[in-house]
Every structure is written in C-alpha cells, then in structure tokens.
Image (spheres, rainbow, N blue to C red):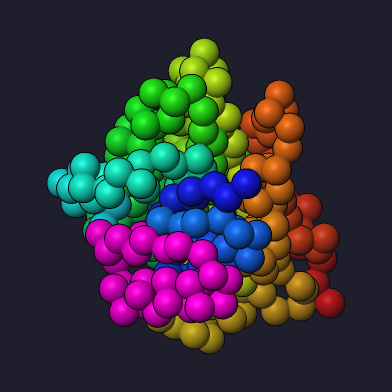
Amino acid sequence: MSKTIFISGATAGFGKAIARKFAQNGNNLIITGRRKVLLEELAKDLITTFNVEVLPLCFDVRKLSEVENAIANLPEKWKTIDVLVNNAGLAAGMNPIHEAVIDDWERMIDTNVKGLLYMTRLISPLMVARKQGHIINIGSVAGKEVYPMGNVYCGSKFAVDAITKGTRIDLVTHNIKVTHIAPGAANTEFSLVRFKGDHDRAESVYKGFTPLSAEDIADAVYYVTTLPAHVNINDLVLMPTAQASATQFYKK
C-alpha cells in the first residue's frame, strides 16, 4: 500500500536518492529544500518517471517560521505522513576549534540540530494523533566518534544520536518507530560543501577506496521502513568496506 513520505533536504545527495527509492516503490512524496529550481525539477522527474504524487515545499529548515508555515498549510490529503526522513544536514569547514569560523558553527547547529528538532516537533503530533508513523534521522559516524577538526560537526551529530534516542523513548507509547542511520564516508556533495566549493580537496577525500553512494543510504532507509510492525531498528551504522572507523581506511 502506498505511503506518504516526507523528506527534508531532498534536492541532492542522500535526500534525492531516498526520494527516488521511495517513489520507485510507489510511494507519494513531500520533498523539501532551499533550492527551488532543483526541487521542482526533482518533483517533475519523480512524477513522470514513477507515476506518483509529489508535493514540493521550498523552505529552510533552519527558520522556524518557514517550517511552521509549511506544515500548517499542508493540504488535508498530505497530513497523513507515514515516514519523516530528517535528512537535511551539512558540514561547514574543517578547522581546529581555536581557528574555527563562527558562522560555520551556526550553520551546522541550526541545520543539523535545530532544523531536525523543528521538523520533528511539528510533524510528530500528526503521527501521535494516528498512533502510527516512523521518524528516521540521518546522522553520521561523526556522531559516534570525534575526529581531528571535526569538533562542532561531530558535536551536532552526537546531538542527532542523542535526540533520536530521546525521541524513541518519548514516542514508544504512541506506537511510533524511530531510527537513527549513521553513514560513514559517502561520495555526495558533503565534502564539496564542507570545503566550500574546493573540488580538488573534496575529491581527494575519496581517493584510493570505494565510498558509499547516496543510493546505498537510500536502500538502508527504505529497508528499515519495510520491516514488520513489531520490529524497529533503533540504530544503523553503515561504512564502506574500506573504512573501519571515522579515521581508519584501507586505501589502495
């Protein structure tokens, strides 16, 4: 049976691959992002390719008023949200803490932590009212281990891990599933954003081994939503075969 899937940060990387995976399997989608042109192009592609319904919502998860406006004005038919994928997130900069750019900290905390909280706070009541739903938070191995010059990014992803655990505890009596998915090295826009458009530095991160793809993460996200009603995956960590920890790799 078709479900309604709400995906934040859907215009690229994990979010775009997750949207395609769910659409491929006949689900209707609410997709969000800040880049309106890319969002509308994705919506058109999903509708044409997979014959599903798609509602694109262009807003910034960092801005509570925009999130409130988007959720409050959902058409009635779109309020039955079965799965929320809190995917919007980023790393900005890679500096030791005493040389960090404060604006980078603000972007990461506002997106990775506060944006996820805003989305969860406003959508979870719709699930609680129905005693049904699944919230999936996309974290990172950076939320399991701290690495050099990861300081605030790691802190934000540790927060995602803790918030997910707290959400699971708070919503268990309402029959709502909650899952944390923590990818390791994955070749998306992640490093390009972290290094602020420096293509050479971004590409060097993945040299000598095969990283995860966005589709690998989409497969994992989709999988956890297909399990029997009595089964919940609380925490799922995925790494490339060549990666053993946040900093340990086998490179050829």
Name the residue located 63 percent from the left edge and 65 percent from the top edge. Answer: 24
At which x and y percent is residue 29? Answer: 46, 57
Name the residue located 71 percent from the left edge and 24 percent from the top edge. Answer: 230
Count the marks. 0
Position of residue 214 in the picture relative to residue 105 (left or right): right
Position of residue 32 in the picture relative to residue 172 (left or right): left
Quadrant location, the C terminus = bottom right
Position of residue 160 in the picture relative to residue 121 (left or right): right
In the displayed orientation, state which residue is furthest to the bottom.
200
Is residue 185 visible to us here? no
Span highlighted in magenta in the image: 31-59
Name the residue located 45 percent from the left edge and 62 percent from the top edge. Answer: 53
At which x and y percent is residue 219? Answer: 69, 57
Res 159 → quadrant: top left
Figure check: 137 above or below 149: above
Name the residue located 54 percent from the left edge and 70 percent from the top edge. Answer: 51
In the displayed orientation, state which residue is furthest to the top.
173
Position of residue 236 in the picture relative to residue 135 (left or right): right
Figure check: 217 above or below 152: below
At which x and y percent is residue 236? Answer: 69, 41
At which x and y percent is residue 26? Answer: 60, 59
Asked if residue 219 is among those painted magenta in the image, a careful observer would answer no
Is residue 82 visible to us here? yes
Query: Of residues 116 and 102, which is closer to you in this image?
Result: 116
